[in-house]
Image (spheres, helix red, strand yellow):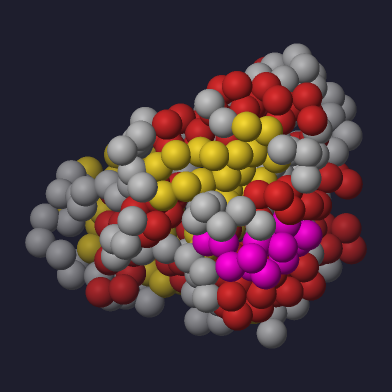
Amino acid sequence: MKTIAFLGVAHIHSPSFIRSILDRPAQFTIKSLWDSDPERASIAAEHSNCIAVSDYRDILSDEAVDAVIVCSETNLHRELVEAACAARKHLFVEKPLASSADDAFWMQRAIDAAGVIFQIGHFMRSYPISRQLKAWIDDGALGTITRARHSNVHHGALAGWFDPGLGWYEDGFYWMTELERAGCGGFGDLGAHSLDMLMWLLGDVECVTAQVDRLLGRYNCDEYGEGLLRFDNGAIASLAAGWVDMLNPQPVLISGTGGLAYVDNGKLFLKSDNLQGADGGEWTDLPAALPHAFVLFLEALLGESVPLISAKEAADRSAVMQALYQAAETNTWVKPQIP
């Protein structure tokens, strides 16, 4: 039995994480919960069958707590991660790790020095199609990768998903549209997942440029955008993300000197001279899905050997996203601040 506590429940994924833990009562228990808003903490504690505390330090000083889940506002991540690392608590942090490269790499160093189990909420690597693309790229089935595209969009701004009154609390998840607390708008929120996928597939980023914009004015932040990334290996990729798209029919395309793979309405298509039967049609022989990133963290707490995302990877992605926003602001190419 592992004992878990929450440092913040502000993020839109907090309810699903709580359910994941409660669904495994023989292995995990939620003992306590803290949030920057006492009323939100009280409501979440009722859903979690646990106690709400007024000071998160009470959680971290509790020797019974094995791990903490950081689902706070992004601008609180550094303070909470610093304290969790000092207390040697294993930790899951909802993405993004930070809004700035400085904060991200500071946290990475603290996490690595503490030697705790760490995971961040990038879940797309677990998809069967993602795993297949990774295998083809690593095996050279697509040759040298020249171009890639990844998009992660939904209609959340059009539908008012972040309006006050939605969710389990009166203010809902409106904070995710406030730049001071969230650090980004729709482009960074959803683009974080696309960025993780592109860097997982293609490696380190040399430089970036981007454009972000608002359309509706419903929220005081960017609602959508598109970035262009040049990787150290010469590959060029585009990244589209935002809250104002009705559909996302073609989220992935990977083109190389030996083949091309793309996704269309959830189906994977492949053309490659290096694989038998890869004639441009649908490819259905896919690996099994892995559990969600959060579930992988739970498995790691139980001692299972599972693929986790390192603190360095998480920090690198925060640095590249910061560079994308800086590029959009200055209308230039920007080199990410990666040590």
Could you say where residue 278 lies in the image, as x and y percent from the top left?
17, 56
Above or below residue 65? Residue 275 is below
Could you say where residue 53 lies in the image, as x and y percent from the top left?
72, 38
The answer to whether residue 299 is left or right of residue 337 is left
Residue at the far bottom in the pictured view: 339
234 in the magenta segment: no
Count of numbered circles on the image? 0
81 in the magenta segment: yes
Q: Nearer the viewer, residue 95 or 296?
A: 296
Q: Nearer the viewer, residue 40 or 253?
A: 40
Is the stretch drawn in magenta largely helix, strand or loop?
A: helix
Rendered residue at 79%/30% (across/down)? 38
* Residue 55 visible in rendering: yes
- The picture quadrant where one finds residue 93 is bottom right
Above or below residue 34? Residue 83 is below
Could you say where residue 217 lies in the image, as x and y percent from the top left?
87, 27
In the rendered image, which quarter contains the C terminus? bottom right
Rendered residue at 40%/42% (across/down)? 28
Above or below residue 330? Residue 95 is above
* Residue 236 visible in rendering: no
Above or below residue 261? Residue 152 is above
Rendered residue at 34%/36% (across/down)? 24
The answer to whether residue 193 is left or right of residue 267 is right
Rendered residue at 61%/43% (across/down)? 6
Residues in magenta, as a range = 77-91
Could you say where residue 166 lies in the image, as x and y percent from the top left?
70, 17
